[in-house]
């Protein structure tokens, strides 16, 4: 019998889960299905944002009068999904290949996959992507974009934020749906800040040519934002804020992070867009260190907080510990254990309260009178044999009976002839946050920054917590390293983040894919309901209601940083309740927990879903802190004369008010959480909104036409001189002649001589000056090239290429299509071009060198009672190896492979259906292997369950084995350190 029990003993493993939101999102096109919305791309409608110069006093800047003469017009263009990512699926795949023991495999199967689907042991890949979309089965309905809704997934979007926000509002119906926007624009320092150009190099310096961004969208954004200094900067800020306001709910908030150099100007623009009556606060938060200055060093940055409608603003009060905030210094008196006459602290005790005898309590005496006459409350009061008179025209803050309660509770003290109220430090061990945040400086031991202007997570998180509830939508139009998205995910909010930089999104994507979060208990879950207040809002466990402590709910309360009892030593805490007491044992201390955020909203409890049961919109279960006030003691029905101190403290605890700690949900340390499903999207082609003085009506001015013609002429002149080369200097296509050509998509034609001495005809198509070459341009240029006389080679020149271009270049038979990357210095002006020279201006775009092989490998046997036949445990699987990047020699047509050093990461869709790219495998070859890899936190949390070899596979150039795709295709996407991407599809 004992042996049977031993056989069934199961080793529990750490459950890895993620939050799935029950909200829906519009069905938007993927890059693969872009042809179904071609008309929207070719002739987009315009969204008009009205301007009203008759509002409150406004700033004036150069060009503003011209801008105000017409509404802000922004084209409404589609956003396309490029990748669908489910980090939990990647972790589950690693666990499956970690070769667990049979007992652990059983525990993994139940702990990690229970409730997610039917059939299959842990050895069988569970398809978490099965319910990623939630779209109709019929293909014609799936491509009926914007008319159906799918499951919510968070969003990371590459593109101009003004264009993207307009698309979200008009095409996807998100106008009035965003709860909070966190906007961190350039501070305006020198009006010439650089951008990070590589994921490997965070240190950039203003004015250094090598540190100037080379991304075409950012070059255009830089020129539009800074072309006339602060004047264009303010126009840029106003346009972004105008679009942002349209997205906000009526209860929504916007935060703008800014430095002191331009805060006064930006606040003026905010007053213009939001109205000065909707100004909420100007928050100063301490930064890591002060910038060098001739006079006072600047040690803080600023947040400007505005509401859509201040009368309806959602606000959740946050608290900070009095000990952490240095407010203990206000408590300059102490009282002994027996409650005898309090005394002032000595100078030494003020410096170090730990010197107080054990059990003594810190206190401050407070005023007990208010101005004005009030009947009996204006009468003298007798206490300890002495009559205390009131000042003229004043009254006690409570009734005569209330004064007697205060006296019985030993809460009165005399300072000379004045009666005062004793307020202990542990009456309310926290204080409300105000507009100065001193605790936000990042120590030298904080997380290493990955991005040059990375936002402080504590600052962004505090803004999110103050103005949103779980399930609310947060938007960041300047993504950077993804800090806003990171904290929104941590606290269970939905998020959308936008940036024009591929480097920024490459860093943010990696950060979120590998993030590890605490697992907070949902109010709408069995564990959460055991911890939540009963129907009457009382203490959990009272009157037969379900209750208990966090330990009973399978959780562990997070250690509260604000612990005055411990911080001041045992001599300060006394017997009063503290934050930790109220958090660690709701039942023992008598302080209730708080459930939820939007508990008043009527919503049905959803069915079981991946990431645990419960609706995130019901919120988390939060710790609560007791708040003992003069009023709660004076009105306490249990306080009587002659009670002991313990009885008095218990009576006070039973009737004290409590405050919810929204930043301290209960945590279950037996589970961890990873980022929920999200998509990587883009405007495609990656559009950049034209400058404020450009037209949006489709008409091309003479100036614009001349500008585009000059750009094409400049490119052709440099192409004629430099030719086209690959990464090897001796392999170059040199033109014998190259002439301009007035085609629709072909801009130049010419001839060159190959290595065999034969003359070949070449056509050249030039991509946009400030944008990305997409498959459509390649397709149209190729169609034009094969007509008439025909060409041997089509060279498509661009500063950046859409990932799908490589697939488009395969499809034109005898016509060789080359994607030639133009050196971005061509767009940066003559000075940089002189430094670059002609050696590497046009380079054939390398494609990943991928080797696909099939292996036969034993598969885990599973844990079911009926084992499959022995021959069924072996199956042919696929392994993908990336060997480098293919380099094309234009003179010989030969292709050779180079190193993998420039590859930052690569992804595989192991079952590519041609409709969307799912990141089923992810490998970060450019990340540090030891001590600083993106998955280090998850690795430490799961070190007992996943072996080193499995973790090492995340940084490999060889994939883990996977099954034959049901679609017969796989897709491989490779991303380099500059954020450039290429996608290749293979038959398998």
Image (cartoon, rainbow, N blue to C red):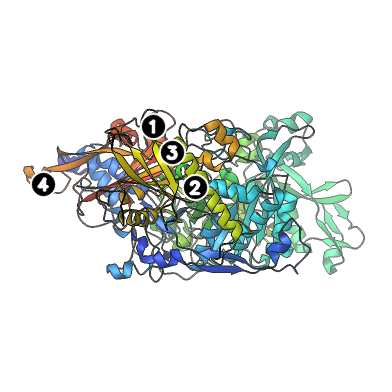
Does the residue at mark 3 contact the one at mark 2 (Cβ under 8 Å)?
no
Residue position for label 2:
486
Residue 867: mark in rendering = 4
Query: Which badge, 1 or 2, is on the more N-terminal residue?
Result: 2
Label 3 – label 4 distance at C-alpha: 60 Å
Q: Is residue 409 left or right of residue 17?
A: right
Q: Nearer the viewer, mark 1 or mark 2?
A: 1
Query: Which badge, 3 or 4, is on the more N-terminal residue?
Result: 3
**Quadrant of the drawing holding the N terminus:** top left
Residue 727: mark in rendering = 1
In front of the other: 658 or 444: 444
Does the residue at mark 3 contact the one at mark 4 (Cβ under 8 Å)?
no
Query: Which badge, 1 or 4, is on the more N-terminal residue?
Result: 1
Does the residue at mark 3 contact the one at mark 1 (Cβ under 8 Å)?
no
Asked if residue 634 shows in the view, the reply is no
How many numbered circles does the render carry? 4
Q: Nearer the viewer, mark 3 or mark 2?
A: 3
Query: Which badge, 4 or 2, is on the more N-terminal residue?
Result: 2
**Where is residue 241 drawn, in percent x and y?**
63, 59
Name which quarter of the figure residue 96 lies in. Answer: top left
The structure residue drawn at horizontal position 23% and vertical position 50%, both measured from the top left corner, is 969
Query: Which badge, 3 or 2, is on the more N-terminal residue?
Result: 2
Query: Which badge, 3 or 1, is on the more N-terminal residue?
Result: 1
Secondary element at tag 3: strand
Asked if residue 687 shows in the view, the reply is yes
Does the residue at mark 1 contact the one at mark 4 (Cβ under 8 Å)?
no
Q: Nearer the viewer, mark 1 or mark 4?
A: 1
**Where is residue 830 drawn, in percent x and y?**
59, 38
Label 1 – label 4 distance at C-alpha: 55 Å
Residue 842: mark in rendering = 3
Label 3 – label 1 distance at C-alpha: 10 Å
Secondary element at tag 2: helix
């Amino acid at each position: 019998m004992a042996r049977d029990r031993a056989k069934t003993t199961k080793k529990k493993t750490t459950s890895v889960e993620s939050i799935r939101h029950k909200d829906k999102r519009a069905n938007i096109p993927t890059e693969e299905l872009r042809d179904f919305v071609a008309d929207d791309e070719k002739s987009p409608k315009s969204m008009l944002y009205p301007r009203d110069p008759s509002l409150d006093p406004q700033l004036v800047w150069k060009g503003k009068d011209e801008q105000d003469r017409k509404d802000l017009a922004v084209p409404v263009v589609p956003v396309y999904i490029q990748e669908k990512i489910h980090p939990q699926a990647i972790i589950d795949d690693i666990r499956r290949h970690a070769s667990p023991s049979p007992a652990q495999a059983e525990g993994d199967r139940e702990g990690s996959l229970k409730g997610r689907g039917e059939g299959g042991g842990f050895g069988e890949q569970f398809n978490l992507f099965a319910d990623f979309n939630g779209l109709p089965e019929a293909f014609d309905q799936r491509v009926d974009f914007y008319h159906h809704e799918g499951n919510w997934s968070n969003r990371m979007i590459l593109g101009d934020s003004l264009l993207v926000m307009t698309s979200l509002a008009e095409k996807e119906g998100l106008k009035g749906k965003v709860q909070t926007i966190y906007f961190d624009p350039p501070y305006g320092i020198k009006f010439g800040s650089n951008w990070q150009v590589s994921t490997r190099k965070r240190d950039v310096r203003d004015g250094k040519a090598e540190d100037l961004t080379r991304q075409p969208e950012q070059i255009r954004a830089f020129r539009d934002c800074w072309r006339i200094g602060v004047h264009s900067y303010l126009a840029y800020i106003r346009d972004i804020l105008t679009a942002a306001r349209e997205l906000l709910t009526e209860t929504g908030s916007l935060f703008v992070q800014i430095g002191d150099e331009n805060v006064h100007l930006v606040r003026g623009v905010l007053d213009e867009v939001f109205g000065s009556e909707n100004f909420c606060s100007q928050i100063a938060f301490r930064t890591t260190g002060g910038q060098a200055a001739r006079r006072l060093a600047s040690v803080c940055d600023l947040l400007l907080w505005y509401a859509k409608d201040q009368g309806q603003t959602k606000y959740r009060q946050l608290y900070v510990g009095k000990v952490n905030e240095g407010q203990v210094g206000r408590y300059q008196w102490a009282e002994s254990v027996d409650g005898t006459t309090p005394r002032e602290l000595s100078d030494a005790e003020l410096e170090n309260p730990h010197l107080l005898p054990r059990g003594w309590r810190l206190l401050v005496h407070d005023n007990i009178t208010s101005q004005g006459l009030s009947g009996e409350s204006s009468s003298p009061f007798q206490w300890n044999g002495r009559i205390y008179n009131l000042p003229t025209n004043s009254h006690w803050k409570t009734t005569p009976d209330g004064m007697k309660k205060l006296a019985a509770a030993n809460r009165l003290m005399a300072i000379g002839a004045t009666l005062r109220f004793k307020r202990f430090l542990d009456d309310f061990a926290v204080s409300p946050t105000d507009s100065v945040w001193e605790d936000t400086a990042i120590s030298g031991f904080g997380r290493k920054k990955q991005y040059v202007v990375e936002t402080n997570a504590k600052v962004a998180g505090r803004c999110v917590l103050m103005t949103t509830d779980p399930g609310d939508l947060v938007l960041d139009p300047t993504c950077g390293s993804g800090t806003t998205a990171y904290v929104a995910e941590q606290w269970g909010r939905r998020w959308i983040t936008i940036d024009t930089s591929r480097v920024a999104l490459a860093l943010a994507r990696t950060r979120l894919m590998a993030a590890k979060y605490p697992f907070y208990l949902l109010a709408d879950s069995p564990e959460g309901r055991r911890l939540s207040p009963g129907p009457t809002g009382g203490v959990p466990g009272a009157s037969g209601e379900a209750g208990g402590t966090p330990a009973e709910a399978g959780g562990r309360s997070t250690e509260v940083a604000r612990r005055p009892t411990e911080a001041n030593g045992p001599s300060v805490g006394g017997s009063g309740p503290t934050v930790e007491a109220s958090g660690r044992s709701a039942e023992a201390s008598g302080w209730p927990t708080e459930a939820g955020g939007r508990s008043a909203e009527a919503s049905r409890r959803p069915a079981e879903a991946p990431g645990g049961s419960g609706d995130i919109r019901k919120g988390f279960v939060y710790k609560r802190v007791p708040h003992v006030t003069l009023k709660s003691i004076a009105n306490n029905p249990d306080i009587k004369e002659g009670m002991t101190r313990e009885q008095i403290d218990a009576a006070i605890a039973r009737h004290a008010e409590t405050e919810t700690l929204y930043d301290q949900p209960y945590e279950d340390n037996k589970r961890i959480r990873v980022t929920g499903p999200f998509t990587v999207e883009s405007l495609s082609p990656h559009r950049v909104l034209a400058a404020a003085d450009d037209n949006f009506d489709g008409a091309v001015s003479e100036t614009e036409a001349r500008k585009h013609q000059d750009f094409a002429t400049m490119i052709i002149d440099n192409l004629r001189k430099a030719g086209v080369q690959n990464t090897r200097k001796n392999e170059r296509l040199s033109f014998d002649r190259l002439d301009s050509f007035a085609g629709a998509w072909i801009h130049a034609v010419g001839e060159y001589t190959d290595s065999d001495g034969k003359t070949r005809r070449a056509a050249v198509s030039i991509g946009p000056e400030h944008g990305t070459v997409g498959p459509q341009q390649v397709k149209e240029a190729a169609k034009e090239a094969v007509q008439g006389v025909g060409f041997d080679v089509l060279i498509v020149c661009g500063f950046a290429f859409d990932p799908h271009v490589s697939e488009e270049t395969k499809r034109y038979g005898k016509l060789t299509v080359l994607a030639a990357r133009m050196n971005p210095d061509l767009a940066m002006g003559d000075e940089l071009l002189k430094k670059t020279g002609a050696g590497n201006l046009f380079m054939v775009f390398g494609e990943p060198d991928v080797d696909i092989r099939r292996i036969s490998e034993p598969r885990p046997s599973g844990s079911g009672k009926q084992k499959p036949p022995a021959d069924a445990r072996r199956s042919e699987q696929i392994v993908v190896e990336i060997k480098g990047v293919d380099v094309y020699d234009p003179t010989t047509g030969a292709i050779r492979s180079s190193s993998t050093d420039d590859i930052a990461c690569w992804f595989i869709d192991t079952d590519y259906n041609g409709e969307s790219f799912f990141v089923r495998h992810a490998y970060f070859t450019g990340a540090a292997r030891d001590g600083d890899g993106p998955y280090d936190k998850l690795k430490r949390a799961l070190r007992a369950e996943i072996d080193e070899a499995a973790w090492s596979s995340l940084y490999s150039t060889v994939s883990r084995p996977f099954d034959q795709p049901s679609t017969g295709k796989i897709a491989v996407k490779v991303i380099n350190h500059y954020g450039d991407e290429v996608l290749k599809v293979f038959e398998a």
